[in-house]
Structures are given as structure tokens and as C-alpha cells.
């Protein structure tokens, strides 16, 4: 059946029906133009309905409605800010380079630590190793730069007036 | 120096404090702003867990966290129950006798249950709005073999407006799973002419109740309970016998608010959009203590916290407070022990509950676990 034939059939089948039951012309046109796709879609819908997956899909889509309903502009902005922070960390070439060395370093340390007898002699021997000295220098520098800036307003100083007087009036 | 004092360590107070600490980090570091959260206990409790506690489905380790762990390090924590607010001197007085000066105050102490306002309720009724009450109800339910169970909404407004519906749906599932449903008559009562104050939720809930064989009584205003006879008597002149009564008691704002002149008809008069307390400069209110026509629910306090924090931050920076709360509310509704739906609405848009599903129940379970991120202001 050609598209024009189908459009005529749809129109003709509506003859005699009250106006409120007739499909608008543009709907008949759309049906005619998409008859193959609609046929496939209806068969798919029928199959999904028989298998119960259509109902599951509708329930799953309710989750989308739920997430949209639960979110607010502030929450979206906050989440984006945190993602941006994480993304900046992930994109940092120095951090990436460090992170790529870390697994091998951890595995080697775990392996070697099992064979090292503790003691001052062993410690001094390791301190003469240039690689260990570079590592120590790295950790000392890290400690210096990790130190928090002194805060003028001491947060975490005050837990409770019963345990520690609070600056009040 | 801006001294921001937050009275209350529930979800609203905690989220406001954390959002402010993040937003005003530069000002706090420079000593221009101080944020203090004053609360009556060192632990933060996730109250919605009490519904599950009543069925033995959660434990204190799951719903309690040290308040300090949830607060940004820039927020000072003060554990000192608030006794009064002296608005003329702009200071909060604690139980310790300490006074805490403020330039801006946030009232977020939550609501309390007052079962003693209904004669006989405290003696004869169970409830799940406190930890002790939920634990006691759990013991009663485990030993309940048959008879009539009445879930009666006595006080309106109350915390978590859908919780009584959740309770009756979960009771239905609980007794079915134990093979005792046919020995138990479930009855749900509500004071107005429908099963919930929100018409859309009532319209959804009525057939859900009916399909489970749950009897409903509307226009049911409890006047007193006779603990000896185990009978509820109503203002309408009817009476209803029970074997187990789960009553939703009247709620009230903490007494210090009324004695400090901060309430009107029991609640704090609050501007519905700016969340400023009416008639008091520099004071905001959020959560259960406001007189707003919104649910007394954690989600409401959470959404309101963003508005209050944004407005306070603007004021600290000398800008006009532009954030507006639009009545946004979101609530999960458990419809059994493995199905749930949800509602979301605001001042202008009514809720449209969706078909209950296991997916939404899982989402609710996942949210319960991730609540601590909400309190920290992360989600």
C-alpha cells in the first residue's frame, strides 16, 4: 500500500464518525509517512508488554523523574564544582605521573619490607641509598607544604563549653 | 566581625553551617566571620531511620554519627542546649549559663513530640518519632500475635507527613510476611475528611489502603484515650477500641522559642521565600519550627538551608539577599517493605506520585546510606 493510499484509507475510515472521534489530517499524514517504523515499534511494544519489560522500563523511567525532582540548582552547582575539582586533580600531569609510579612503589615496598631486618644498622644502610634519600627529601618537602595555614579564627578549638570554655560575649 | 550562630544540629542547621563554611572560607580565614553551631547533643541522629527501627531493620550505628565529624573544620561546635534567645541583646543563652553573641542567627532546632497533650496517649500509645519510642514499638510488634492495630494521626502538623502512611503500609507487609495478616485488623485514622492533608497524596493513598484491606476512619479527631479500656474517644463522639495503638502525637517547637517571644500560634513566623523570621532583624528560621505551609521534613530543611546560607553569605558581603525558597519538598513513601514511591512538589506544583516500585525502594535505601553526604553539604 502506498503512503497516499494509506492516508486516503485513514481519511475514508473516519467518514461518518463524529468530528471529535476523527483523527486530524496531520495525524493521518504522519501515520502514512511512518507506517513501516510504526509497525516495527508496535511489534516491539507488544513484545515488551508481553514480557513485562515495558512495565519495568516505565518504573525505571520514574527514577529519572525522581532524580530530577530531588535535585535543585544549588545541588547541581555544588556537584559540578566538586566534579570540576576532581577533574582538575585528574588532569594534573604531575599528580598523574606520581599516581602512575605509586602502584609499582607500593608493591616493591611490600615485597622488600618482608626481607628487611629492623635495626639501626639497616636504617643507616638505607639512608646511604641515594634513592631513599631522594624519597625522604620528597616526604620532608611534602610535610612542609602540607602544613595548614594558621587560621585567625580557631575552628575545632571549641567543642563544648563544658569541656572547654568558648569565646562568647 | 560577623558572628553567625546556628541553633540546632539537625539536617537544616548542619547543612547551613557547612555551606556557609565553604562559601565564606576567605572571610573566616581572615577573621571577619565566625560560624558557631549550638546543639544539645554531641551526636547527630538521622531521624527517618526510626521508621525502620520500629521494624528492627536498622541499628544505632547506622543512624548516629558524631556531630563534629559532619561539620566543616571551620565551624565551631558548641554542645550546650539552648535555653533562651535574647533578641534585644542579640545573644543565645545556653544551659551552661554561657551566652553566645550573634550578629546573625539561624533557628533550626527542629520540633518535639508532646504526647502528654492528649490524655491517655503517653500511657496507652506507642509512637515511632523518637528513638526510644521506635525501639519500644519494635518490641511490641515482635510480640504481637493478633488483634486490632490502629495508626492514628492525632497531631497535625507533624514531622514527616507521609510517615503514618508508610507505617501502616509497612505494618501490612510485616504481618503478611509473618503469616499473621489475617489475625490483624489494620485501621488508619486521620483528622480531616481524607487520609492525608495533601489532596493529591490523599487521592493516591486511599485506593492503596483499600487494596490492602486497611480500614480508614476520617474526620477522626482524638480527644482522649482510655488506657484501661483500650479505647480511643473522639471529638466527633465516636469511640474505637484497639489492641495496639500507634499514635502520631502533637508536635511543638522547643519551649525556648516561645519563652523568647519567637513564636506565633506555636511556630516561628517565617517569610515563605526569604526564610527571615518576621519582626526580627538578622534572624532566619528553617526546618520544622517554621509556620510555613510545607512539610516538616528533612528534605525541606535541606532545600531551605541552601536559601538561608546564600542569603547570609550575601548579607555578610554587604549584598542584598536574593535567594528565594519556592516550597520545594521531596519525600520517599515506603509502600511496604520492598516497594516505594516518591512525591516532589513546591508552592505552585502539587505532587504526582508514581507507581510504587522496587527501584524507588532501592533508591530510598541508597539515600538512607548516603544521608551523611547530605549533612556534609556534598549532595
Image (cartoon, coloured by chain):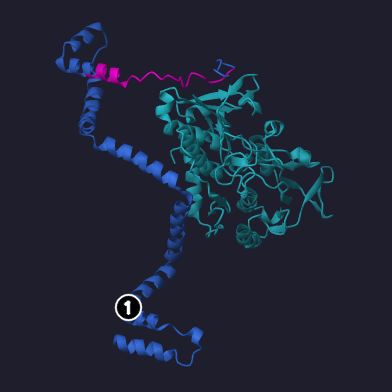
- Is residue B230 visible from the viewing direction of this image? no
Number of on-image labels: 1
Is B332 located above or below residue B109 in the figure?
below
- How packed mark 1 is, by other alpha carbons closer than 10 Å (few <14, some 14-19, many 20 or more), is few
Picture layout, residue B264 above or below residue A121: below
* Residue shown at the point (59%, 17%) measured from the top left: A162
Q: Colour of chain B?
A: cyan
Which residue is at a point 82% across and 55% down the rendered structure image? B236
Query: What residue is shown at x 74% (from left), y 46% (from top)?
Result: B244
Quadrant in which the C terminus of chain B is drawn: top left
The local secondary structure at tag 1 comes to loop
B134 vs B238, nearest the viewer = B238
Answer with left or right where residue B317 lies relative to residue B286: left
Q: Is residue A142 magenta?
A: yes
Q: Closer to the camera, B284 or B376? A: B284
Residue B295 drawn at (x, y percent):
60, 48
The magenta stretch is A138-161
Indicate the position of residue A147 as horizontal and vertical percent values. Answer: 33, 19
Which chain is rendered blue in the image? A
- Name the chain under label 1: A
On the picture, is B84 further left or further right than A161? right
The spot of residue A6 in percent (x, y) is 34, 87
A160 in magenta: yes
Q: Which residue is mark 1?
A: A34
Q: Main secondary structure of the magenta part?
A: loop
Dividing the picture into quadrants, the one containing residue B115 is top right
Which residue occupies the extreme top position in the image? A120
Left or right of residue B212: residue B312 = left
Relative to A94, does residue B353 appear above or below in the rendering?
below
Q: Is residue A119 above or below residue B296?
A: above
Amino acid at each position: 500500500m502506498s503512503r497516499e493510499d494509506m492516508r486516503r484509507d485513514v481519511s475514508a475510515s473516519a467518514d461518518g464518525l463524529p468530528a471529535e472521534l476523527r483523527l486530524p489530517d496531520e495525524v493521518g499524514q504522519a501515520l502514512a509517512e511512518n507506517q513501516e517504523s510504526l509497525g516495527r515499534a508496535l511489534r516491539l511494544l507488544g513484545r515488551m508488554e508481553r514480557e513485562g519489560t515495558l512495565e519495568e522500563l516505565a518504573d525505571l523511567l520514574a527514577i529519572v523523574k525522581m532524580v530530577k525532582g530531588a535535585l535543585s540548582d544549588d545541588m547541581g552547582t555544588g556537584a559540578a564544582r566538586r566534579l570540576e575539582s576532581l577533574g582538575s586533580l585528574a588532569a594534573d600531569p604531575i599528580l598523574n605521573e606520581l599516581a602512575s609510579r605509586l602502584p609499582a612503589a607500593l608493591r616493591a615496598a611490600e615485597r622488600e619490607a618482608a626481607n628487611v631486618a629492623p635495626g639501626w644498622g639497616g636504617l643507616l644502610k638505607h639512608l646511604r641509598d641515594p634513592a631513599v634519600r631522594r624519597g625522604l627529601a620528597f616526604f620532608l618537602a611534602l610535610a612542609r607544604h602540607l602544613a595548614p595555614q594558621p587560621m585567625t579564627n580557631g575552628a575545632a578549638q571549641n567543642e563544648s563549653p563544658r569541656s572547654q570554655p568558648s569565646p562568647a560575649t | 566581625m560577623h558572628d553567625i550562630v546556628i541553633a540546632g544540629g539537625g539536617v537544616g542547621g548542619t547543612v547551613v553551617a557547612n555551606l556557609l563554611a565553604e562559601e565564606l572560607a576567605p572571610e573566616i580565614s581572615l577573621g571577619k566571620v565566625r560560624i558557631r553551631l549550638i546543639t544539645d547533643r554531641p551526636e547527630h541522629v538521622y531521624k527517618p531511620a526510626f521508621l525502620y527501627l520500629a521494624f528492627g531493620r536498622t541499628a544505632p550505628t547506622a543512624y548516629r554519627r558524631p556531630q563534629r565529624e559532619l561539620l566543616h573544620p571551620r565551624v565551631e561546635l558548641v554542645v550546650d542546649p539552648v535555653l533562651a534567645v535574647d533578641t534585644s541583646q542579640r545573644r543565645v543563652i545556653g544551659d551552661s549559663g554561657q551566652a553566645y553573641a550573634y550578629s546573625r542567627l539561624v533557628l533550626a532546632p527542629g520540633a518535639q513530640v508532646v504526647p502528654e497533650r492528649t490524655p491517655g496517649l503517653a500511657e496507652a500509645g506507642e509512637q515511632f518519632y523518637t528513638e526510644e519510642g521506635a525501639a519500644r514499638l519494635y518490641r511490641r510488634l515482635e510480640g504481637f500475635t493478633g488483634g486490632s492495630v490502629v495508626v492514628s494521626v492525632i497531631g497535625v502538623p507533624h514531622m514527616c507527613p507521609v510517615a503514618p502512611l508508610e507505617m501502616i503500609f509497612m505494618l501490612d507487609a510485616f504481618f503478611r510476611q509473618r503469616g499473621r495478616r489475617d489475625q490483624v485488623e489494620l485501621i488508619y485514622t486521620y483528622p480531616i475528611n481524607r487520609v492525608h492533608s495533601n489532596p493529591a497524596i490523599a487521592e493516591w493513598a486511599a485506593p492503596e489502603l483499600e487494596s490492602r484491606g486497611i480500614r480508614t476512619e476520617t474526620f477522626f479527631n482524638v480527644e482522649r484515650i482510655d488506657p484501661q479500656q483500650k479505647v480511643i474517644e473522639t471529638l466527633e463522639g465516636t469511640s474505637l477500641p484497639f489492641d495496639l495503638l500507634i499514635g502520631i502525637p502533637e508536635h511543638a517547637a522547643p519551649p525556648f522559642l516561645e519563652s523568647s517571644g519567637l513564636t506565633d500560634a506555636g511556630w516561628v513566623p517565617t517569610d515563605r521565600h526569604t526564610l527571615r523570621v518576621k519582626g526580627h532583624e538578622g534572624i532566619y528560621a528553617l526546618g520544622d519550627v517554621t509556620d510555613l505551609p510545607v512539610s516538616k521534613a528533612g528534605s525541606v530543611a535541606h532545600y531551605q538551608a541552601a536559601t538561608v546560607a546564600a542569603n547570609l553569605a550575601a548579607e555578610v558581603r554587604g549584598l542584598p539577599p536574593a535567594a528565594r525558597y519556592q516550597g520545594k519538598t521531596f519525600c520517599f513513601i515506603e509502600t511496604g517493605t520492598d516497594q516505594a514511591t516518591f512525591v516532589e512538589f513546591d508552592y505552585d506544583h502539587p505532587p504526582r506520585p508514581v507507581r510504587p516500585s522496587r527501584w524507588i525502594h532501592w533508591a530510598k535505601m541508597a539515600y538512607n546510606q548516603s544521608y551523611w553526604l547530605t549533612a556534609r553539604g556534598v549532595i
